[in-house]
Amino acid sequence: MVTDEKVEQLLERITALENRVDELEQENEELKQENQQLRKENKRLRAKVRWYEGPHTPPSKEQPGDEESSSSDGDEDDEQPRTDGGTPGRKAGHEPEWRDAPDPDQEIEVTCDCCPECGEQFDESAGVSPRLVEELPDPQPPEVTQYNRHHYECHSCGTETVASHPDCPDKGQFGVNVIAQSALSRYDHRLPYRKIGDRFEQLHGLELSGASAWHATERAARAGRCEYEQIRYQIQQADVVHVDETGIKRDGEQAWIWTFTTENHTLYAVRESRGSDVPAEVLGEDFAGTVVCDGWTAYPAFSSNLQRCWAHILREAEDAAEKQAEGEPIYRALKQLYVALQTRLESDLTVRERAELQRVARRELESLIERAVPDGPVATLLGKIEGGLDHWLTFIGEPAVSPTNNAAENALREPVVLRKLIGTLRNDRGMFVHETLLSLLATCRQQGRNPYEEFKRIARNNKMISRAQAVPAVASSG
């Protein structure tokens, strides 16, 4: 039996629930308004980010997001390379790694005669605590050597000969160590020529002006030009070459630095052109290998055997999806197709299986192209996919070909950093030195060779090409 007291309690509970519902509705409305404001702010910030980071910006240059840098568990960190710009060092839970202890060159006994507190004399040592200390010797002053180069005249043909020595350069008064260190200080340590001179004077007491440091660096480039041409020959014979280009100034005018990189060689070429004539000049018009590249029109104008970069098209698809709702399913389909292809290619496929996989993947791309979308970023994206339809899937049929052009983009990082430091190349001589020494240094590192030893070896090469031979070869290619 329901009493009046129970009815009153029920009514009070109903009233309290109604009040609570009103409060929740009000709170929900406030959250909706806040969410709307946050969406507007997010849209504004995304637009601002796109101003600095377009779809062609590689992931290495993108700013990390809070969700990427803060939310990740240990298993994912182990499987994926770190790209969030976090602090270097050992990750939590990983065992530390230590440097291998070197063998000592000498041992010094460090003893004590008495107690520093009370002065009591010690009878004998109670033990030894060895400590290895690695130290550099004091910099040595320069050595000055006079090479008395003898002249000879052949009595039979009248040819005059001047005796040569590997440590005596054809020109200038600086030896191979100075030439090698000047070149490395500029292109590996990124020092201005004035500071290169300061470094020589501080460490060795060698007076070297900024102009002298430049001339020493130029001699290293002229000595290494023959090796530069050998690198170009090796790249011309390669089956796969990654190619990319970026802007650089020459005396304030627009020029371009191109990179051509393989597994073991990298060559840079500074040119005033961004057209197909540059790869035709560097690789040769009869180049038979595969060019991995982005969507720049110079590449299909040069060769029909291309692999377009999937990293570029996926970034462009993601950007189009953010700008236009119709782009979301296309971006998702492209990403799923790329991941599926990568997974399938991990197994050892036969030539027939690869050909069939290529046909299936092409049909998937064609189905994307056939979608009806309004004009805008998504339509532009589908046009790019259609324009490169013959070049997106080369990597399926050719196992040595990478689906991305990351190798060339990585090779351009060092020239981009130098571009920010030096601002502009002054003339053809600067272009010649820039492309030569960057190529030699990058190739040294790819092949695991010591750059300093290699630059000394190059500086000992007495077959330096003259400035008159070197500069026109670069200038005429612009």
Image: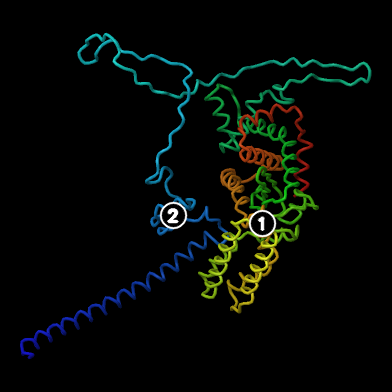
User: Seen in the image, is 377 located left or right of residue 108?
Assistant: right
- The one nearer the camera, 424 or 241, is 241
Packing grade of label 2 (10 A; few <14, some 14-19, many >=20) is: few
- Identify the mark nearer the N-term, 2 or 1: 2
Image point (69%, 40%), residue name: 436
Q: Quadrant of the N terminus?
A: bottom left
The residue beneath circle 1 is: 293
Q: Nearer the viewer, residue 294 or 53?
A: 294
Q: Position of residue 373 (x, y in %)?
A: 59, 78
Q: Which residue is mark 2?
A: 76
Q: Position of residue 339 (x, y in %)?
A: 55, 62
In the image: residue 435, left or right of residue 124: right
Label number found at residue 175:
none
Label 1 amino acid?
Cys
The image quadrant of residue 465 is top right
Is any atom of residue 371 visible in this view? Answer: yes
Please tell me whether mark 1 sits on a helix, a strand or a loop: strand
Write down the quadrant of residue 182 in the picture: top right
Q: CA distance from mark 2 to mark 1?
A: 30 Å
**Residue in front for this viewpoint, 197 or 315:** 315
Residue type, mark 2 in image = Glu
Please tell me whether residue 263 is drawn above or below residue 354 in the rendered image: above
Q: Is residue 327 above or below residue 254?
A: below
